[in-house]
Amino acid sequence: MSKFEEKVIAKIRSRAEVGKKKYGTTMEREDLSLIEWLTHLQEELMDAAVYVERLIEDTQCPIHGLAAEHFPNSLSSCPYCRRLRRGTETLKTD
Ligand SMILES: [Zn+2]
């Protein structure tokens, strides 16, 4: 198993402990209906999609939309406006 699976396993164990302390229950709870489980899943997937969209935008010039992988230098400033992608926050003015 790779370090990535090991890290995910550790995080799942930690979340289970936090959930048990915070809500006093585990994933073995029997008080939710099928539709309530599916609704929880859908809400988590919608949150995940929003996080992915945010991170995709973080890789792009906010004006030209180019992904950082198309920027010619390693510091990832846009070749057209020299703006650095979001997260680096400084605007080059040369
Ligand atoms: Zn740009």
Image (cartoon, grey):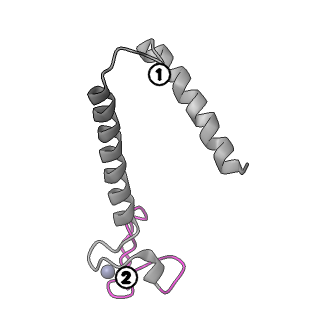
Tell me: is circle 1 under 8 Å from ligand 1.
no
Q: Quadrant of residue 84?
A: bottom left
Say which amino acid is labelled 1. Answer: Gly
Say which amino acid is labelled 2. Answer: Arg
- Which residue is located at x 56 percent, y 33 percent? 12
- Which residue is located at x 55 percent, y 21 percent? 17
From the image, which quarter does the C terminus lie in? bottom left
Q: Is residue 62 above or below residue 5?
A: below
Rendering coords of residue 9 (x, y %): 63, 37
- Front label number (1 vs 2): 1
How far apart marks 1 and 2 lie (CA) works out to 45 Å
Q: Nearer the viewer, residue 33 or 10?
A: 33
Residue found farthest to the top = 24
Rendering coords of residue 24 (x, y %): 45, 11
- The mark nearer the N terminus, 1 or 2, is 1
**Residues at badges 1 and 2 in contact (C-beta under 8 Å)?**
no
Q: Is residue 80 above or below residue 89?
A: below
Residue found farthest to the front = 34
Mark on residue 71? Answer: none
Which structural element holds mark 2? loop
Mark on residue 19? Answer: 1
What span is in magenta?
Answer: 72-94
Q: Which quadrant of the frame does ligand 1 lie within?
A: bottom left
Q: Quadrant of residue 45?
A: top left
Which residue is denoted by mark 2 in the rendering?
A: 82
Q: Is residue 30 above or below residue 89?
A: above
